[in-house]
Image (cartoon, grey):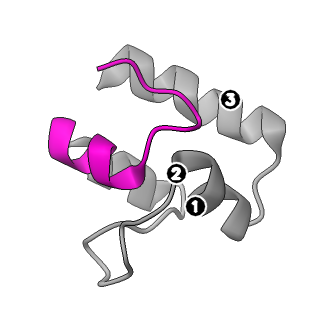
């Protein structure tokens, strides 16, 4: 899967369930906490206060590890 900041959280979860733990560790909650999984990685990260550099870091780590 090619992950970008525009990839939806739902797509990430469906394609790589282990990524849920990674996202949760970064404070981006997915299905584990009951929050909706709608929206993009960028939208979810921005809601938690992450900047462009952090979001690009998440994209890079997700691509490399999941």
Task: Name the residue beneath numbered marker 3.
Answer: 56
Determine whether label 3 and label 2 are within 8 Å by CB: no
Q: Which SS class for mark 2?
A: loop
Pick the quarter of the image with the C terminus.
top left
Question: Horizontally, is 43 left or right of 25 in the view?
Answer: right
The reply to whether callout 1 and callout 2 are in contact (CB within 8 Å) is yes
Which is closer to the viewer, label 3 or label 2? 2
Q: CA distance from mark 1 to mark 3?
A: 13 Å
State the image coordinates of residue 52 (x, y, percent, origin top left). Answer: 81, 39
The quadrant where residue 11 appears: top left
10 Å crowding of disc 1: few (<14), some (14-19), many (20+): many
For disc 2, the neighbor class at 10 Å (few under 14, some 14 to 19, many from 20) is some
Residue 4, position in %: x, y?
53, 28
Left or right of 47, for residue 13: left
Q: Which residues are magenta?
A: 1-17
Query: How far apart in space, not on screen, are marks 3 and 2 (Cα)?
Result: 13 Å
Between 58 and 13, which is closer to the camera in this rendering? 13
Q: Earlier in the sequence, mark 1 or mark 3?
A: 1
Question: Quick check: 24 above or below 42?
Answer: below
The residue to which callout 2 is attached is 40
From the viewer's side, name the closer residue of 29 and 44.
44
Using the image, tell me which numbered label, if any, was put on residue 44.
1
Q: Residue furthest bottom?
A: 34
At 41% from the left and 61% from the top, the residue drawn is 24
Q: Secondary structure at mark 1?
A: helix
- Measuring 51% from the left and 62% from the top, which residue is drawn there? 28
Q: Please identify the quadrant where the N terminus is shown.
A: top left
């Amino acid at each position: 899967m090619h992950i970008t900041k525009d990839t939806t959280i739902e797509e990430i979860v469906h394609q790589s369930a282990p990524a849920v733990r990674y996202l949760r560790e970064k404070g981006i909650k997915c299905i584990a906490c009951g929050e909706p999984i709608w929206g993009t990685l960028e939208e979810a990260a921005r809601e938690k206060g992450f900047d462009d550099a952090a979001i690009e870091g998440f994209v890079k780590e997700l691509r490399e590890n999941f």
